[in-house]
Amino acid sequence: MSVADEEKWDILTDELVDMLNKARAEKLAEQASSKTFLSKLAAAHEEVMATFASFRAQLFAELPVAMAEFKEYVGAINWTEPFVLALVGFHVSILALLFASRSRAEVQNAVFLLSVVIVLNAERLNRFLSSHWHLFVRENYFDEGGAFISLLVSLPLVLNMLVVLLNYAVMFMQTLVVMQQERLGLSSSTRSKAGAAKKSAKAAATPTRKSSRNKKKN
């Protein structure tokens, strides 16, 4: 091997070594970045789990207190007052109307829109009743926080809206089932008609074949 060939071989070897070193460095960099990403992902997961654990602990710690306050507030309401009984009767009537008219979309839409309008104007209604409470009840239940309105007006109406949405879903599923049944019925009737047409065509073709055979024999 000549000196020129040895120099070329050395140059190729150096280039190959450089390429291998670069590939190894890139691979190590990718592994480092992947490890960094996995470590960041693990840290984020641990942070989310810690936040969820603290939220759950706080919720379970405050839930008995909230339930006790809720029971105390409900017990403080005079449920024999005509206004309170009228509210309860109104919500029971609306719920009965929803179940009685579950197949009539126009009634469901009217109840849903009425509930939305009342819930959106609950704050104004609370201010009005707070100013004129002596015309409706013996005690002023209409505080600035709107707890009475939220409990006896907004919450039942929101539940009624959920009932309407659930009924919409049921009606939609029933419509899909009816459409599928109609498609299946049309396909089966089409098949039966096609089968009957084939049978009638065969029956019509049989006498002509027999007559042609008889003519040939004669």
Image: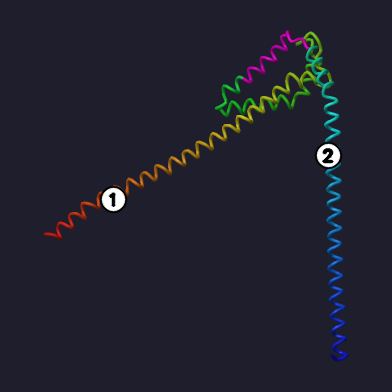
Among numbered discs 2 and 1, the one appearing first in the sequence: 2
Image height of 191 relative to 1, above or below: above
Q: Secondary structure at mark 1?
A: helix
Give the residue type that dot 2 points to. Met
Residue 104 place in picture, x, y as percent? 55, 27
- Tags 2 and 1 touching, CB below 8 Å: no
Residue interval drawn in magenta: 77-95
What is the image's colouring? rainbow
The numbered mark at residue 215 is none
The residue where tag 1 is placed is 201
The residue where tag 2 is placed is 49
Residue 140 place in picture, x, y as percent? 81, 12
Q: Residues within 10 Å of mark 1 (few under 14, many from 20)?
A: few
Identify the image quadrant of residue 120: top right
Left or right side of 113 for 149: right
The answer to whether residue 38 is magenta is: no
Tell which tag, 2 or 1, sits nearer the viewer.
2
Q: At 58% across and 28% down in the image, what residue appears?
A: 106
Image height of 30 relative to 175, above or below: below
